[in-house]
């Protein structure tokens, strides 16, 4: 008999969900989330989209509702952006003491729960309007549990110089955390956002964030997501964006952490002359399983998209890349480029990559390419002949491999921090 | 002093024997040329000195200043002062020439217990030396050897040699593919490095290079063995008579 879902029991997690903001819309959204979660259940590998991301061990564990958890101290936090605006969430909830939300002209950045109270007319129709929870059980579960997160609004025409750096820290064992982030980038604005998913030391937690970004006409947004949780945690996220005409959204997915990590990134290009980037750097070692599913919808004509995924895999780690690009019937003059490359550092790694281009328009330029390779022995020997150690040579070659994506990041301090982190992880 | 005694080596992968008993001693300040027809094992010898793992040393010894090179990994040999200018320099996209060279210089300093060189002093040093090889400054910011012309690659090898200041320089056909001007530049670069305590092993197929880098000794390698050794006049004799002459000699000896 083939079952498509695992038996799992998240009822105590759901019944123990933390209180909602006082809002009828939020309550309705939660109810919709629960319904969507119950309908979908936890997929088995028989479902194509979850084939290489085993959920059995997650289904079998007895999960607890997320609690506010032990305190995280300021000195435990590190920051990647120099002089950025600091936003801290601990176990799914905004931490006002750790955050530095100084007022910046043209920017609102604060708790999502508070935003429901402060500007319900703005927030209510937005939250949940982008994320597709009917095709992602964890996004549905997040919605069933959601209670707080971060709401960012960059006002029309505002040029925000400071990087907004959001750090989420998970601390509880066997707990489920379901934060939400919503970014509203209004017409003609520009901003840089760094979103980091961390744990406080080891944490056998399950973090299931939903991030939504609404990028209005002519807005220019650079958004870097860095998932670097401890190797005993699980992280399953949804990141979904909706772009209007003439906008530019550069979305970078840096996936280094968690024992099992999955990200579904869905980008909708819904306005003409928009540009989208969705690039990734993945670095998996030991027994990590890192799965990235990206989906790009070219719904209108004259848009460009670029996607480069660089995946470094060591030890017995397993990495999945699934890249869908849909070019709709109307989307003439689309220019879409996808490449994904894997660098295998050990013979016991696994890589599953699947580009999936579905093109319904006839006047388009779409290319994709995938390569799998190893460290080049000639390059390694050349470096060692010059006195560089085997480890450093490997580090440099891995860095060079990932550099094509890291070099795209415009925030110098973040780029440097990521290079250092990548190097650290491999040594 | 480099001392190689009865060295034999085979291809790691298929066990094909290439070096069939090499004896050579290079004293400080000396330049030894190794000549021989294609496929005689010149590059193999150079690579075995540098420690390439594709070759397995099956017999003999090899020491540099009394230290056993055969026990060392390629990077350790480099720290001891071994440098090889590659016959085919390797391209490394994504790693800048400057970064690479600085990593190399610092790795050697670290091995000697010295402090890392400051970025400023390093830049000053390489700017002085790059002029010597007549290379343009923008090669420094480009990726290692990527998109370099054949001549630029060869000059870049000698430039790296000038920066690293090794004690044993092995040049593997650094002259091949160079026009006469580039050949002179490369030779000038090498000659500028000649000093009473530095050793050179210059591998070449043609005598031409040896007009500019004048050797103290010339050895002829054939089928994995050194069949003849002599002074610089041996190179000229070989040039005149061609490699076929050696076959006649060996036949006559039998
Ligand atoms: N890595 C290798 N694998 C197999 N055969 C090799 C390898 N390296 C060298 N050889 C063989 O050994 C012989 C000597 O090669 P090489 O040292 O490159 O000669 P030279 O530099 O004098 O032209 C040739 O027959 C060559 O094909
Ligand atoms: Mg050769």
Image (cartoon, rainbow, N blue to C red):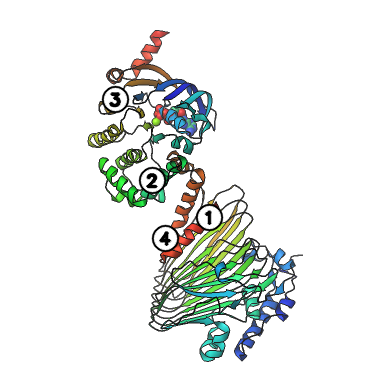
Q: Is residue A34 visible?
A: yes
- Alpha-carbon neighbours of circle 2 within 10 Å: few (<14), some, or many (≥20)? many
Residue A403 falls in which quadrant of the image?
Answer: bottom left
The residue at the point 46 percent across, 50 percent down is: A396
Ligand 2 quarter of the rendering: top left
The label nearer to you, 2 versus 3, is 2
Return the x and y of residue A112 as percentages of the image width and height: 56, 82
Q: Which residue is mark 3?
A: B207
Q: Which residue is mark 2?
A: B101
**Chain to which the residue tagged by mark 1 belongs:** A
Return the x and y of residue A342 as percentages of the image width and height: 52, 54
Q: Which residue is mark 1?
A: A424
For the residue pair A245 and A393, the one nearer the viewer reads as A393
The residue at the point 49 percent across, 52 percent down is: A398
Real-space CA distance between mark 4 and mark 2, rounded to the nearest whole angstrom: 21 Å
Tags 4 and 2 both on a single chain: no
The tag earlier along the polypeptide, 2 or 3, is 2
The label nearer to you, 4 versus 2, is 2
- Alpha-carbon neighbours of circle 1 within 10 Å: few (<14), some, or many (≥20)? few
Real-space CA distance between mark 1 and mark 2, rounded to the nearest whole angstrom: 21 Å
Left or right: A237, with B114 as reference point: right
Quadrant (top left/top right/bottom left/bottom right) for the N terminus of chain A: bottom right
Real-space CA distance between mark 3 and mark 4, rounded to the nearest whole angstrom: 47 Å
Q: Is residue A339 visible?
A: no
Instruction: Indicate yes or no: mark 4 CB to ligand 1 under 8 Å.
Output: no
Residue A117 falls in which quadrant of the image?
Answer: bottom right
Q: Which mark is residue A407?
A: 4
- Alpha-carbon neighbours of circle 4 within 10 Å: few (<14), some, or many (≥20)? some
Real-space CA distance between mark 2 and mark 3, rounded to the nearest whole angstrom: 31 Å
């Amino acid at each position: 008999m083939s079952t498509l879902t695992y038996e799992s029991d998240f009822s105590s997690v759901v019944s123990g969900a933390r209180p909602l903001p006082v809002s009828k819309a939020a309550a309705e959204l939660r109810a919709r989330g629960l319904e969507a979660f119950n309908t979908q259940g936890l997929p088995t590998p028989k479902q194509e989209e979850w084939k290489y991301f085993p959920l059995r061990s997650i289904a079998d564990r007895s999960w607890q509702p997320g609690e506010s958890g032990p305190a995280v101290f300021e000195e435990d936090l590190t920051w990647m952006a120099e002089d950025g605006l600091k936003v801290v969430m601990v176990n799914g909830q905004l931490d006002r003491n750790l955050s530095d939300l100084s007022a910046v002209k043209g920017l609102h950045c604060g708790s999502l729960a508070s935003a429901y109270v402060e500007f319900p007319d703005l927030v209510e129709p937005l939250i949940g309007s982008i994320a597709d929870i009917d095709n992602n059980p964890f996004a549905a579960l997040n919605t069933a549990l959601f209670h707080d997160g971060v709401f960012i609004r960059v006002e029309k025409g505002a040029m925000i110089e400071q990087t907004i750096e959001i750090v989420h820290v998970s601390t509880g064992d066997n707990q489920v955390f379901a934060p939400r982030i919503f970014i509203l980038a209004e017409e003609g604005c520009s901003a840089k956002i760094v979103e980091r998913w961390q744990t406080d030391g080891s944490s056998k937690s399950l973090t299931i964030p939903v991030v939504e970004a609404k990028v209005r006409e002519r807005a220019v947004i650079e958004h870097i997501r860095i998932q670097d949780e401890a190797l005993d945690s699980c992280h399953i996220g949804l990141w979904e964006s909706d772009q209007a005409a003439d906008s530019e959204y550069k979305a970078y997915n840096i996936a280094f952490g968690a024992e099992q990590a999955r990200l579904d990134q869905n980008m909708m290009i819904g306005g003409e002359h928009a540009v989208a980037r969705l690039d990734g750097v993945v670095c998996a070692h030991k027994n990590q399983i890192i799965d990235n599913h990206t989906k790009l919808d070219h719904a209108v004509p004259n848009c460009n998209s670029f996607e480069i995924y660089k995946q470094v895999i060591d030890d017995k780690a397993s990495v999945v890349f699934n890249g869908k690009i849909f070019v709709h019937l109307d989307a003439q003059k689309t220019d879409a480029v996808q490449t994904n490359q894997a660098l295998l550092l050990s013979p016991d790694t696994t890589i599953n990559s699947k580009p999936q281009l579905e093109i319904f328009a006839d006047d388009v330029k779409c290319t994709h390419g995938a390569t799998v390779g190893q460290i080049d022995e000639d390059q390694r020997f050349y470096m060692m002949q010059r006195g560089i150690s085997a480890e450093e040579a490997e580090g440099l070659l891995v860095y060079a491999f990932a550099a094509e994506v890291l070099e795209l990041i415009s925030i110098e301090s973040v780029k440097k921090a990521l290079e250092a982190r990548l190097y650290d992880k491999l040594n | 002093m480099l001392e190689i005694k009865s060295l034999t080596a085979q291809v790691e992968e298929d066990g094909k024997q290439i070096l069939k008993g090499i004896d050579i001693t290079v004293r400080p300040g000396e330049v030894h040329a190794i000549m021989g027809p294609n496929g005689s094992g010149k590059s193999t010898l150079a690579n075995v000195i540098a420690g390439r793992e594709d070759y397995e040393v099956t017999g003999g010894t090899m020491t540099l200043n009394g230290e056993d090179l055969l026990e060392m990994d390629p990077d350790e040999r480099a720290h001891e002062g071994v440098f090889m200018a590659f016959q085919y320099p390797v391209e490394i996209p994504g790693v800048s020439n400057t970064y690479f060279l600085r990593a190399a210089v610092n790795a050697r300093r670290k091995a000697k217990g010295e402090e890392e060189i400051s970025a400023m002093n390093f830049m000053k040093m390489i700017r002085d030396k790059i002029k010597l090889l007549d290379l343009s400054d923008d090669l420094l910011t480009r990726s290692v050897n990527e998109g370099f012309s054949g001549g630029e690659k060869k000059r870049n090898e000698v430039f790296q040699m000038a920066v690293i200041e090794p004690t044993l320089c092995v040049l593997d056909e650094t002259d091949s593919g160079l026009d006469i001007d580039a050949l002179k530049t490369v030779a000038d670069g090498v000659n500028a490095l000649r000093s009473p305590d530095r050793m050179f092993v210059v591998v070449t197929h043609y005598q031409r290079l040896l007009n500019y880098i004048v050797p103290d000794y010339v050895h002829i390698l054939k089928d994995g063995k050194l069949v003849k050794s002599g002074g610089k006049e041996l190179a000229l004799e070989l040039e005149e008579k061609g490699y076929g002459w050696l076959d006649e000699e060996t036949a006559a000896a039998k």
